[in-house]
Image (cartoon, helix red, strand yellow):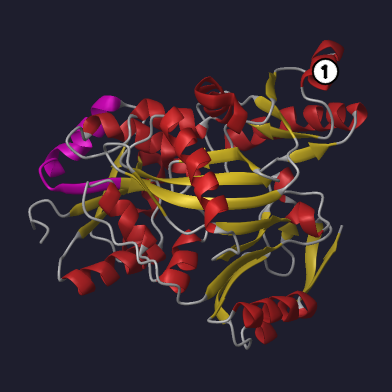
Amino acid sequence: MISHKKNIIILTGSLFKSVVRAIHSYEKKTKTKFRICLLRDIKERKNHQETKQSTNIDIIITCDTHDPSSIQKSLLPYKDQIFSVTTRGEYHIPLLARIVPHVPYIKNPTSESLLWATDKLLMRRRINIHNKKINPKYTVVVDTSKKTLKKINKKIGFPLIVKPTGLAASQFVSICFHKEELEAILKKMFKKIQIAADKKTSHKEQKILVEQFMEGDMYSVDAYVTSRGKIHFCPMVHVKTGNTIGFDDFFGYRQITPTLLKNQNIEKAHAVASEAIHALGLRSTTVHIELMKMEDLWKVIELSPRLGGFRHNLYEYSFGINHTMNDILIHAGKKLSIPRKRKGYTVAMKFFAKKEGRLTKLKGIKKAQKLASFKTIKINKHIGDMCTYAKNGGGSVFNIIMFNKERSKLLADIRRLEQMIVIETKK
């Protein structure tokens, strides 16, 4: 039984209703009671009351999150009541890193390891020192000079991937097949990442990473790392990017679990993921790892000290894992529950417009909700909204999650869904 004295769960940056539901589900199952707290920057205080009412949380702490004294002062009234401190989403990990020194008796990763894992360049360098065989070839770019382009061609070769070092998910990730394309994309990217950084009030200089394009099958997995570095893996997830279905983009189009991987291949994937986690010194955290299977080799695409996108739903429907609560528990050093018995197959899908422009038509949504495998849908764009690719900083038109006890029936519904959805745009 968890002590009622230490029962505050602090989430930094933002809080979703799904997180609150997962906590309440755990409370009901274990007959415990927590107080849910959102800690965020004072600049967001204008939405204070609205957030508290809409998410049904207990405490909101606001402070200047770039001022250590302000953080310390705001946490002081609760210092002996905190059970766990965690975050959701890659954008809020730097905030968590600033909070960690002020909660020294809560099990958390070090601030340094959090920053290593959220800067793609630092991540590559740490992994390279540990074992460069699990890394693709890479280099960092600071300009678009002829000398730089020549260096990239010699060191990396084409095709290659270009991405900022500090932006989350698939934002601004592009593939280049020749020098002229590379030069144009680099110039465009240097401008766009500065705009994105300004919008998100980033305090970190954005750099551009150029990496070898890895051809193979993409997988991802979430894992829980204890305070002693022991790793408990969740089930593997197979990923299809937009690039594999004809988009000139790398958003995660389809994620499905469980996979068809044999145990031997899963063990190899786990071994590579473990090396990457330990190279970054991560502990007392959930880690999301993206991997590329290239024949018999596994390489690290990237990793982040957070839950993967859609991961709570994928693991909950297919295995009954309360992934959100396990993340809270690993930050508290408590026992996890990781059921292994398969209940069925789950898919999460993101639908983007084929062409950028204003959304003029979105057809098939009502039919999609009548599919036997349908679970949930989130519509992000409405008629008149601007649709842009992920590589240009855009988001999906809608996301959908489906589940079926039988894989063949789920695949059939995926096919039906793809055939019924119509997304049209106009410049």
User: In the rendered view of the protein, which quadrant contains the N terminus?
Assistant: bottom left
Is residue 108 highlighted in magenta? no
Residue 389 visible in image: yes
Question: Residue 357, image x and y in percent?
Answer: 81, 57
Dominant SS in magenta: helix
Image position of 173 (left or right of 25): right
Seen at 65% across and 45% down, the residue is: 292
Seen at 27% across and 36% down, the residue is: 228
Image position of 235 (left or right of 254): left
Foreground pick, 191 / 141: 141
Question: Residue 31, image x and y in percent?
Answer: 15, 71
Say what amino acid the circle numbered 1 marks: Lys
Question: Residue 171, image x and y in percent?
Answer: 66, 43
Quarter of the image where one finds residue 260: bottom right
Residue 64 visible in image: no
Q: What SS does tag 1 mark?
A: helix
The vertical placement of 152 against 212, above or below, is above
Question: Residue 96, image x and y in percent?
Answer: 36, 38
Foreground pick, 42 / 19: 19
Quarter of the image where one finds residue 370: bottom right
Is residue 81 highlighted in magenta? yes
Seen at 60% across and 52% down, the residue is: 219
Q: State which region is magenta.
A: 68-85
Image position of 108 (left or right of 81): right
Residue lying farthest to the front in this orientation: 264
Image position of 411 (left or right of 95): right
Which residue was labeled with disc 1?
Answer: 154
